[in-house]
Amino acid sequence: MPKPEKTRKIIHIDMDAFYASVEQRDFPEYRGKPVIVGGSPEGRGVVAAASYEVRKYGVHSAMPAAKAVRLCPHAIFVKPRFEVYRKVSSQVREIFFQFTDLVEPLSLDEAFLDVTENHQDIPSATLIAQKIRELIKHQVNLNASAGVSYNKFLAKVASDLDKPDGLAVITPEKAPDFLEQLNIGEFYGIGDATEKKMHSLGIKTGADLKKWSKIDLVEHFGKTGRFYYRIVRGVDNRQVKTDRIRKSLGKERTFSEDVDDIEWINNFFDELAEKISERLKQKNVAGKTITIKVRYSDFETITRSTSFDHYIDEGSDIAEAAKILLEQTQAGKRKVRLLGITLSNLNLNDEGIYEQLELPFD
């Protein structure tokens, strides 16, 4: 008889208030102070990151900087230093590789690790997570929170349970009761709009969601209904993927308040483009086609695209193209609730692997 499949051991590491924490680490005068990393409130900037000292005032990422300063007038605004954040992220990733090669970065500040089999033959994923947090603290002088479980979904949920600087474990035995008691808005993958829709249907906890059949969930939420049906039962078979073959790379953001200030939107595109540029350079990839996505307040969603005859990966180039495309929309005249930028037509070879970018030297 075949051996039963070994229970996987998955860790989700999430750096605490990453950008803001790096600034507080590097500049002692910011420590213990409410620090906001992002654009200036005078320039219609956007909050890219908020320290824990400023979060207690209700400030959060993607919030207009002007609103953030109203909530916390004594906040310290700091311009992002993406090169520094990338360097620190690489240092943290090297710590991960001491334990496993199965590392799936989600962004500069978070990643999944599969430590079912690991380089140090440590049987406890919880012990590995604790060692990783200690090494990050010792070598990088930053705090990280960790979640440990038997799949990616639960590990991600667990990492939010004891923030900041915490460690939480969800075992297979504890998972059913934990998921039933979890508020629906705390399920990873369920955003504000879906949470409101679920509340309108009487779904407020995991126990409520578990009562729904797969057919009914698909009827109300489309294909995503199957995902909701599985996760509330603790089922997530996704593997930790170290090299995802992607045909595009982008980011989008749904705002807590609808926006019609075109200057603010343009500034948001500047910051979004810079984040996409980070990811492109991290993966040593570039693209030729820019697509923007605009969802108006009435949920009408449109896209606009343009292509270049050369590869681009600089944030300024991405932002400039995105703003030109934005002029083909009604953003600024109509309120928008979501904006996104995607770069596609990436420099992949026939096997789907990123090709080395050639840099011309005189």
Image (spheres, grey):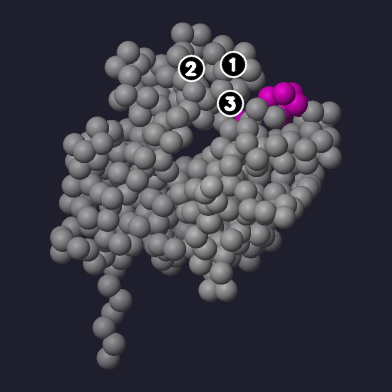
Residue that appears at 32% across and 33% down: 164
**Residue 132, how many percent across, how many down?**
23, 47
Residue 266, can we see it? Answer: yes
**Residue 94, how many percent across, how many down?**
28, 50
Q: CA distance from mark 3 to mark 1?
A: 8 Å
Dividing the picture into quadrants, the one containing residue 124 is bottom left
Contact, CB < 8 Å: mark 2 with mark 1?
yes
Name the foreground residue: 250 vs 32.
250
| For marks 2 and 1 on the same chain, the one whose residue lies earlier in the sequence | 1
Kindly identify the amino acid type of the residue bearing the numbered disc 1. Pro
Q: CA distance from mark 2 to mark 3?
A: 11 Å
Q: Residues within 10 Å of mark 3 (few under 14, many from 20)?
A: many
Element at label 3:
loop
Residue that appears at 52% across and 25% down: 38
Q: Which residue is mark 1?
A: 41
The circle drawn on residue 55 is none
Bounds of the magenta span?
254-264
Name the foreground residue: 100 vs 361.
361
**Residue 128, how many percent across, how many down?**
20, 52
The circle drawn on residue 77 is 2
197 within the magenta span: no
**Residue 9 located left or right of residue 257:** left
Element at label 1:
helix
255 within the magenta span: yes
List the single residue furthest toward the front.
362
Kindly identify the amino acid type of the residue bearing the numbered disc 3. Val
Residue that appears at 45% across and 30% down: 81
The circle drawn on residue 46 is 3
